[in-house]
Image: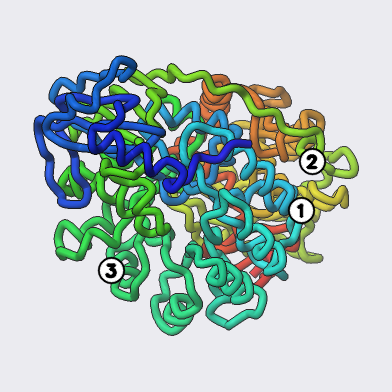
Amino acid sequence: MSQFPAWSDVAPRLVDVATGRSPADMVIRGGRWVNVHSGEIIAGTDVAIAAGRFAAIAPDLSYCIGENTKIVEAGGRYMVPGLCDAHMHVESGMVTVTEFARAVIPHGTTSMFIDPHEIANVLGLAGVKLMHDEAMTLPVNIFVQMPSCVPSAPGLENAGASLGPKEVAEAMGWPGIIGLGEMMNFPGVAAADDKMLGEIAETMKAAKTVGGHYASLDLGRDFMGYVAGGPADDHEGTRLIDAVTRVRLGMRAMLRLGSAWYDVATQVKAITEMGLDSRNFILCTDDSHSGTLVHDGHMNRVVRHAIAQGLKPITAIQMATINTASHFGLERELGSITPGRRADMVLTSDLIALPIETVIARGDILAEKGSLIAEIEPYAYPAEAKATVRMGRKLEAGDFDIQAPEGASEVTARVIGVVENQAPTKALTATLKVEDGLVAMDRAGDVCQIALVERHRATGEVVNGFVSGFGYMADCAMASTVAHDSHHMIVVGTSKADMALAANRLGEVGGGVVVFKDGKEIALVELPIAGLMSDERAEIVAAKAAGMVKAMEDCGCTLNNAYMQHSLLALVVIPELRISDLGIVDVTKFEKVPLFV
């Protein structure tokens, strides 16, 4: 495990290069300097790099060039700081940290702030340490936020592990830990829960940043209590008022564009129309699946999108570089092309289209013309990180039967309503027929079944409910062991027989995502690491994921990034209605509710 040398270790060398007493390792000549501190673009600029850091920036640095100095001709291209993703979950890409890095480096991302609470819900603190140690081996900056809510909602779900202030205090001493991950238990913070405030206190003692997650439309007293409780940022805003209120109360508003979350356009109006100070706004992705990474991009995609919403290019770049660095207390380390900072840079010929032509990280050229050129070896996960799908028994179609109240000919059932391109769901109701004592689905009304299969403790338990929005028309089922945040198994389908086949298949392969149609497997993405991540290359996983998306379409689903919607159906910290291993959960009240009204 390697760690990037501290500034103090290389400061003499940087000073010698800057003053001309020693040659630079690399000089980039003739670029347009995108200065995120001053908000300027300065043409005709050279940049000198030594010991993995920027040493000097000036119109002419020929005095820094020695016999072994590598010269890169910028040719008038823009020199942009390496892009930073302020909040994200590697596991959403269905690949390891190493493979995620391989996928996003060609897109210009050189710094990531990752919250591995997915693996934490399966493997606990040991899982966090695995991803932390892997991140430390990579040639880009990957900082880890210690997961705060495992389980995310105590009393409403059971995860594969439980973490608290003691574990948070331990992790704060690890070299790659940058702060506390998103504090999703916002009712707990607002209620001054000892455990939640204890975790925040341990983070504050370590002088590190507390991540936020307030997934409620109510910006009244509870929100005020939440802010007073310590979270310093929030990425759960979807409305203009969300961004405005967060910034006014001293938080950073993180605007996200992930594979399925499109929350930039509404909130960026706080800057473009209301004129709020852009320094307190940050861009992030939160969740990006492998297909998005391979085909569409990463933070370059987010910056392009933000510019398309009316932001000045320099402002959008600031929100993906220096604003992020400043928020995490790393302004002297990264986020700008200035002396002493880590030498992370993107060369691009167009600030609006943002083609990523050259990527430099820590003074090394890692990617050219959209392709990785650096050798980054695969990272091997130990055996204990695999074989985590413990169902206890094989399931049958009858496990998905929903018994009706005695004597009923029809029932009014609560239904989870999927909202396209957003994390929240709707709390719907539907009148469903009863056939032979069992509640029937309503395929014509787009109401099919959802089940949560317990997979951590081999209890064999199945919780059943109803969901609407996927539009499945065939006899089909989709199962996934990626089920934020507790990561049991979620099965959605119109055929109970296919639901059983899909669940059992994931038990066989050790986790992943599978689609069955008419009794046959038509797509499979194997995710053997904690049931969340593949050990294959991102390109391979992306191809399999594309097959999975096509299979969902073949079953009648037309939702954009429907898999991401599927994976969040058990996320009992985002309103309105969810499913957990304990039953149906009304997240607006944070309580379990009966399936039938």
Instruction: Kindly indicate whether the residue at mark 2 contacts the one at mark 1 (C-beta within 8 angstroms).
Output: yes
Q: Which residue was labeled with disc 1? A: 160
Question: Spatial distance from mark 3 to mark 2, Cα to Cα?
Answer: 42 Å
Judging depth in this view, the residue of 597 and 350 nearest the camera is: 350
Residue 189 sits in quarter: bottom right
User: Looking at the picture, how far across and down is residue 453, in whole percent?
Assistant: 76, 48
Which mark sits nearer the N-terminus, 3 or 2? Answer: 3
Residue extending furthest toward the front: 21
Q: In this view, does 427 lie to the left or right of 271?
A: right
Looking at numbered disc 2 in the image, what kind of residue is underneath it? Thr
Q: Dot 3: within a 10 Å radius of its alpha carbon, few (fewer than 14), some, or many (20 or more) residues?
A: many
Instruction: Kindly indicate whether the residue at mark 1 contacts the one at mark 3 (C-beta within 8 angstroms).
Output: no
Q: In this view, does 122 lie to the left or right of 137?
A: right
Compared with residue 25, is residue 129 higher up or lower down, i.e. above or below?
below
Judging depth in this view, the residue of 553 and 59 nearest the camera is: 59
Identified at 79% across, 50% down, the residue is 454
Q: Can residue 100 be seen in this view?
A: yes
- What quarter of the picture does the N terminus occupy? top right
Instruction: Kindly indicate whether the residue at mark 2 contacts the one at mark 3 (C-beta within 8 angstroms).
Output: no
Compared with residue 6, is residue 371 higher up or lower down, i.e. above or below?
above
Identified at 41% across, 45% down, the residue is 85
Question: Spatial distance from mark 3 to mark 1, Cα to Cα?
Answer: 37 Å
Looking at numbered disc 1 in the image, what kind of residue is underneath it? Gly
Judging depth in this view, the residue of 288 and 100 nearest the camera is: 100
Question: Spatial distance from mark 1 to mark 2, Cα to Cα?
Answer: 9 Å
Q: Which residue was labeled with disc 3? A: 244
Identified at 47% across, 67% down, the residue is 214
Q: Which type of secondary structure does the marked residue at label 3 adopt?
A: helix
